[in-house]
Image (spheres, rainbow, N blue to C red):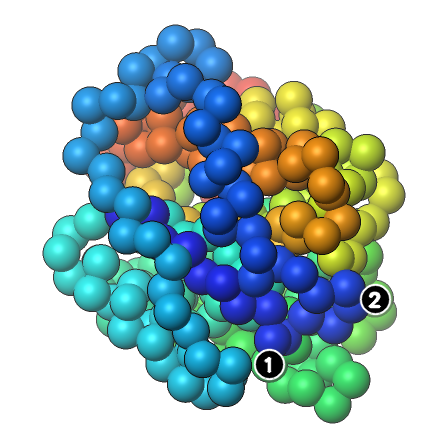
Amino acid sequence: MLLGIPYDGSSSFRPGARLAPPRIREMAASLNACTEAGQDLAAIPAVDDGDLPLPTDREQAFAQIEAAVERIVAEEAVPILLGGDHAVTVPAVRAALRHYPDLSLLYLDAHPDLYPHFAGDRFSHACVVRRILELPGMGGQRITQVGVRALTPPQRRAAEEAAIRIVPAWELAAFRYAETGPVYLSLDIDVLDPAYAPGCGNPVPGGPSTRQLLTLLQGLRCRVVALDVVEVNPLLDPAGVTALTAARLVTEILGTLVSPLGPWPGEAPDSSGGPSI
């Protein structure tokens, strides 16, 4: 189930991600309902539930996001969330954990988001993974962060102490992801190099191309039970290139949900290629 999360009250720099859901939908209309390889997605029983009407108060907004995700998961549907800034992942993961206590997190982002607080704000989008670590039942050994290239010494120590696996941007070519349990996939659009996604609030040079990220997503060997695409900022990209890229990324992720390339839980993972977890 597709659900827009128009919230950016936790942005630390250049807000505007609250405007992304309708822009992503608008640009998605230019794409056909197929993956790059021609896999037809039109038959998927998907529902677009519109945008969640959120208040400006963060506590109330997070409570509504959590309730909405829990409702979708309880219906045995896959929530596909269009943010919004990355802080919306915290209540979404909290809801998913209630139904999937062995949930793993695959976190694609240029930033590790492991600050205990940022500019005095514990729920800044720069603190997302730190807050997720505090959720009951979520351990760092079940978190993999991919595309990171803005790591600070305190955040590195926090990752090491929590046993989080960090895959920096320069190691993506060898990275493979295989997981037998349920996975929450969170994709911050700034994982891409800003040359390919200029419409984001906190761009970091040195990231992968759109082609490289698509290849990574197409090669996932896991069972995604919830996902979000966040931090698209239409105010910084009037041409809509970033929103269009976000729509294409969602399409390819849907392709892996319907017909994954490789073994699923209970089968031996594909051992070819690079490292897997």
Q: Residue at x 60, y 81 (%)?
A: 123
Considering the numbered disc 1 on the image, is that residue within a helix, a strand or a loop?
loop
* Mark 2, residue position: 152
- Reply above or below: 37 against 261: above
Of all residues shown, which one is farthest toward the top?
38
How far is disc 2 from disc 1 in space, using C-alphas?
Answer: 19 Å
Q: In this rendering, does residue 269 appear at all? A: no
Q: Nearer the viewer, mark 2 or mark 1?
A: 1
* Mark 1, residue position: 123
Q: Residue at x 81, y 34 (%)?
A: 195
Q: Residue at x 29, y 22 (%)?
A: 41
Q: Is residue 111 left or right of residue 93?
A: right
Q: Position of residue 101 (x, y in %)?
A: 28, 66
Considering the numbered disc 2 on the image, is that residue within a helix, a strand or a loop?
loop
- Reply above or below: 245 against 121: above
Q: Position of residue 6 (x, y in %)?
A: 49, 63
User: Which of the two labelled residues, at mark 2 and mark 1, occupies the earlier sequence position?
Assistant: 1
Q: Residue at x 63, y 75 (%)?
A: 10
| Amino acid under disc 2 | Thr
The image quadrant that residue 16 belongs to is bottom right
User: Callout 2: few (<14), some (14-19), or many (20+) C-alpha neighbours within 10 Å?
Assistant: few
How many badges with numbers are in the image? 2
Q: Position of residue 50 (x, y in %)?
A: 33, 53
- Reply above or below: 246 against 105: above
Of all residues shown, which one is farthest toward the left?
75
Q: Position of residue 37 (x, y in %)?
A: 43, 10
| Amino acid under disc 1 | Phe
32 or 204: nearer the eye?
32
